[in-house]
Amino acid sequence: MRHDIRFLRRGHEVRLSSFSPTLTLLDYLRLQERAVGTKEGCAEGDCGACTVVVRRLVEGRVRYELRNSCIVLAGQADGCDVITVEDLANGELHPVQQAMVDSHGSQCGFCTPGFVMALFGLYHTPRETPLDRTAVNDWIAGNLCRCTGYRPIVDAALSSCVSPARDRFSDEDAAVALKLAAMTGDVFAGTPDRFFAAPASVESFAALYLDHPDAILVSGATDVGLWITKQLRDIPKIIWLGRAQGLAHVDEAADAVTFGAGVTHEDAAPHLARIDPDLGELMRRFASVQVRSIGTIGGNIANGSPIGDTPPALIALGATLALQRGGLLRELPLEDFFISYGKQDRVRGEFVRSVRVPKLKAGEYFRCYKISKRFDQDISAVMGAFRFTVKGPHVTSARIAFGGMAATPKRALNAEEKLAGADLRLSSDWQAAIDALAQDFSPIDDARGSAAYRRHVAGALLSKALTEIAGVPSGATRVTGIREVADAAG
C-alpha cells in the first residue's frame, strides 16, 4: 500500500499525497504546474481543447492514449507519463506542430493545443491500414474547431502521421517503460473519510469496496467527471478501477466473448466488430477517441443510463452479467440488471465484474442502429438493437432492445412475441410487431426528441432491420464500412 499517486512529467516522477479526490488533471496542470497550454473549453469532455496524451504500460508495452483532462481525475494519471503541448517542441517544432503551421491549421488558436495533441497521439498509434482522410476524421471527432473547417487540420495529419513514429518520445519509450513498471501496489491517498484509492488487483478492490460501500467507483470518469465539473459535486470517497489487474481481460471463446468490466471501448471494439459489423460501426460512432480510450464496457453498463449505447446491443445478443461482492460471484441476464431509472440490481459493496456476450449462431441475424442529431460524438435519441433467429423465410424468435425509449435499456417483449412466425417475405406480417412497440414503451419528450418522434423511429428501425435481413440471400457476404463478413444464414 502506498499513500500517494505517482506519474511522470518531463522525465521526472511526481508524487501527490495531499489532494482533493475530485481534483481534475486539467486543474492540476493549469493551477499547480501552470502548464496553461492545455485549455478548458467545455469542461465535459466534448470539445477536445483540454486533450493531453498519456503513455502507459499495456501488457508490458508503452501505449500512447488521448485524455480529456477536463473530466479525467488527477489520480487517474497514476502509473502514466503525462505529455502536454508544452512538451512537444525541443529546439524545433514536433513534426505534427510543423505540419499544422505548414497547412495553416490554426486560426484563432484556442482549439489548436488540443488538435496538436490529438495528432501527436495519432502519430504514435500503430496502424494496420494506410491513413486516409476518413480515418483522420474519425480520429479528430473529439476535437471541435469553429474557424478552419477542418480541411487544413486533416491535411496536417495526412502529411505528418503516415510513417511510423520517430521522435525523441519514441526513443524514450524503453526508459519510460521501466519507470512506469516500478509504480506498483495499491494506492490509498487520504483518510478513511476522504480519499482517492486505486487498488492494484480485483481482490484488493473487492475488499476495499466492502469496507467503503459508499465510495463512488470510477472507471473512465466520463460520467462522474461531469458530476464534478457541471454539478459541482463534492465526492469524498473515490475508488478508481483503472489499475485493478484482472478487470481488463478479454476472453474470446468459440461461442462467446467475455469482457472484464475494465475493458475500454477502444479495446472491446475489434472483438465486438467480429461478432457483427454493425457493432463495429456502433463503436466507431461511440463518443470520441478520448472517451473510448478510457471509458469502459463495465462503466457504460454500471451507470445504468437509459441512453447508453452498448446495453441495448448487448441485451439483444443475450448478454449475461457477472457481479461480485467480496469473494462471492453471481450471474444474471443483463436486462435484469436494470430495475428503474437510476436503480440497478446491485447490493452495497457489489460491483460489475464482467459481461459475457454470445456470438451469433447459424440462422441468427443481428442489426443495431444509433439515431442522434449529430453523426459524431452525440448521445442517442433512440438506440435500437435486434437479433432474429430465422428458419427458411420465417422468424422463429426475436430479441429486441431499445435505449432512449424508457427509464432503462429495455426489451420489447410484446413486439418479440408478435414477430414469432412472421414471414420475412411479407411486410404485412411485421406490422403487428411494429404496432406492439406502443405497448412496450411510453417514451418521454426531451431535448433529443419528442415521444412521438421516438415511437415513430423505433417502428422504422424494426422495419429497417427486417427489410435488410429479408434481402440477404443465404450465405451472402454483407459489406459495411468496417469489414466484410459472411452472413450466418440458416
Image: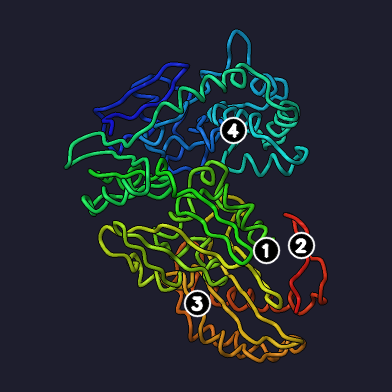
Q: CA distance from mark 1 to mark 2?
A: 8 Å
Residue 473 in sight in this render: yes
The three-letter amino acid code for the residue at tag 4 is Ala
Q: CA distance from mark 4 to mark 3?
A: 38 Å
Q: Nearer the viewer, mark 1 or mark 3?
A: 1
Q: CA distance from mark 1 to mark 3?
A: 20 Å
Position of residue 39 in the picture relative to residue 104 (left or right): left
Q: Are marks 1 and 3 in contact (CB under 8 Å)?
A: no
Position of residue 470 in the picture relative to residue 53 (left or right): right
Which residue sits at x=29%, y=29%?
A: 4
Please tell me whether mark 2 sits on a helix, a strand or a loop.
strand
Question: Quick one: 30 or 444, which is closer to the camera?
Answer: 30
Position of residue 167 in the picture relative to residue 452 (left or right): right
Q: CA distance from mark 2 to mark 4?
A: 31 Å
Looking at the image, is mark 1 or mark 2 earlier in the sequence?
Answer: 1
Please tell me whether mark 3 sits on a helix, a strand or a loop.
strand
Residue at the outermost top position: 91
Looking at the image, is mark 1 or mark 3 earlier in the sequence?
Answer: 1
Which residue matches tag 4?
118
Q: Are marks 1 and 2 in contact (CB under 8 Å)?
A: yes
Q: Residues within 10 Å of mark 2 (few under 14, many from 20)?
A: some
Question: Quick one: 270 or 109, which is closer to the camera?
Answer: 270
Residue 321 x %, y %: 44, 65
Instruction: Name above or below for residue 131 compared with residue 389.
Output: above
Residue 459 x %, y %: 60, 79
Residue 52 in sight in this render: no
The three-letter amino acid code for the residue at tag 2 is Val
Q: Nearer the viewer, mark 4 or mark 3?
A: 3
The three-letter amino acid code for the residue at tag 1 is Asp
